Structures are given as C-alpha cells and as structure tokens.
Amino acid sequence: MSGAVTIRGAGVVGLCVATELMARGVAVTLRDPALGPGAHGCSWWAGGMLAPFCEGFSAEEPVVRLGQQAADWWEAQGVGVIRRGSLVVTLARDRRELDQFARRTTGHRLVAGEELADLEPHLAERHDRALYFEGEAHIDPRAALGHLRKRLEEGGARFEAEDAVPEGPVIDCRGLAAQDSLPDLRGVKGEMVVLRAPDVTLSRPVRLLHPRFPLYIVPRADGVFMLGATQIESGERGRASARSVMELLSAAYALHPAFGEAELLEIGADARPAFPDNLPRLTARGGVLHVNGLFRHGFLLSPAVARMAAGLVTGANEKAEFFHEDHG
C-alpha cells in the first residue's frame, strides 16, 4: 500500500501493530501525548507474564490459543524472553484452590519435594507442592517497550505529538482513551508494587492462589520483584489504594517472610481497557481501525492482534478474528 499509516497510541498495542506493519513494508507514524514509553499508560505497569495456560483459568479459549504465540514473537523482535515456566502455589489451608486451578487449566504438572526444591529452593521451604507450567515465559515489559520503540525509530518510523491531525489510514490503539469512539469500552483498574528483596531468590513468575487476594510475583534483575493481581471494575487511573497495597504486601509476606524486609521501590496503578466479554476487538468505524480491549493480556495478545490488524490494513486478511465492522 502507498502512504504512511498513522497509529494513535504508542503503548504495547500500538508498538506491536507498528512493528507488524513495518515488517510488511508499510511506513508508520505513531502519535502519542507522551511520545514514548513511560508511566503514562497501563503498558508501563504490566507484569510481562507470557502465561497463556494460567490465564485459561478465567479467560476465554482464544486467549490461551493465541497467547501461545507470544513468546516466539517477542523473541523474534530481539526482546529477552525468559523461558523458565511459571509456578502456582497455595497456602496449606487453601489446597482446594490449587486443585480447582489444576482442573480448569492445561499445560501443567504437579511438582513436589526435591523437584520443587530444584526449581525454586525458597518456595520449597514453605510450600510442599505446586503446579508447574513449563511452557510459559516472561519478559521485562518496560525493557520490551523501549526495545520496540528503538527498533521502530531505526527502521524509519516517526513519533509525533498526539495533537497533530492524522493523514492517511488511521489505526487507533489508544486504550481507555478511545472511550470517545468506543462507548462499550470500560476500565479495569490494576495496582502493582515493585520491591527489592535481596534475601529472596525466584527465577520464574509465581502465582499465589488466595480466596481474597490472589498474588503474582514476577522476578526482575538484581533482586527486584513486581507484585500484582488487583482487578477492580473502575476506570480510575494513577491512584493505588492503601488497602490494595497492604493486601499485596501481606500476600507476598505469606509466600515468603523475607518479603517483609524488602525495600519498597514503586507503587503504581492504571486502568486496563476491556470490552464486556474481556476479549480484544478490531473495529472498523468511520475509516479508522480501532484495536483495543486487550484487558489484562496486553503483552500476551498484542503480537497476535497486531498481525491481524496489519493483515486487515494491507488486504492480506479480510476475516481476522475479533474483527467487527461498525456501520453506525
């Protein structure tokens, strides 16, 4: 196709769509108020877990199926993908939670004793069994955002302020800001905490199942961990509640007491964009292709959704999954 495509929004969805379009020889211009990755959008506060099988506990089938493509896609872009799987554990009193999780998911096996100790010695000190999802992976989302932007700039992509008037085909990837065009888009607030806990060693993401406040912990470099899992029906952005932070920290302490001595580095919150069915949509409306509604699966589903969007724009795929044509 001739002419540049304008992409509104430079979060994970916009950057992935731009990457797929440029791979097809299409020039792109990205427009975003913040002009790059930073603490201005929900992509910045993501956990970076590429965990399609775990997500199958509550997510629809397409999330599990399409999410299995994510690790290979990110690795193909030069992003560091850590393929050590993930673990799911419970406290002793909540064993039924683990059994239920096992029944509703696939891609796992039960590990205990020496095998669990070989995987995560610090977990084995307090937990006698876990579900091991060996085929899952994780990335550092902030590093991934910066890496994609750098590659796009080196490839000739332009980054401009959002207040410029788009020219040519437009793909809207603004997340929750697109409620002005997508009235059934809603916000689902998520909160996270970043800790430095040098006395804890984890080499893969760990989910602690809990009836009141489930937790996931994702290891970063140098003893840093990201804690998250809050999911609140609210479009409020930028304010983490004291209750949520205390529950996250309490759950981390229950997972391993050494988290009680951790250094608190960051507290963050933002609202994820979601449609009523919690699945993404590619909506053609008024000459604009809206790519939105990735809910809590931004880094997991953006690669697959970006391929669909690029196929629609270039005419290579007229029947993309999640595609809706709005004539209203």
Image (spheres, rainbow, N blue to C red):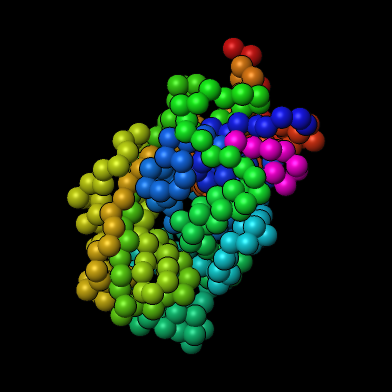
- Horizontal and vertical percent for residue 165? 53, 22
The N terminus is located in which quarter?
Answer: top right
Query: Which residue does the image show at 64% across and 37% down from the upper left?
Result: 28
In the image, which residues are magenta?
22-29
**Left-right relation of 127 to 166:** left
- Horizontal and vertical percent for residue 105? 56, 57
The C terminus is located in which quarter?
Answer: top right
Query: How many numbered marks, from 0 up?
Result: 0
Query: Which residue does the image show at 52% across and 62% down from the upper left?
Result: 139
Find out whether residue 35 is within the magenta segment. Answer: no
Query: Which residue does the image show at 57% across and 25% down from the upper left?
Result: 166
Vertical order, 125 against 217 (above or below): below
Q: Residue furthest right?
A: 316
**Left-right relation of 96 to 139:** left
Q: Residue furthest top?
A: 328
Vertical order, 193 against 11 (above or below): below
Using the image as rendered, state which of residue 209 and residue 276 is in the foreground: 276
Classify residue 267 by image quadrant. Answer: bottom left
Find out whether residue 23 is within the magenta segment. Answer: yes
- Horizontal and vertical percent for residue 22? 69, 44
**Residue 132 is at least partly visible in this image:** yes
Classify residue 226 by image quadrant. Answer: bottom left
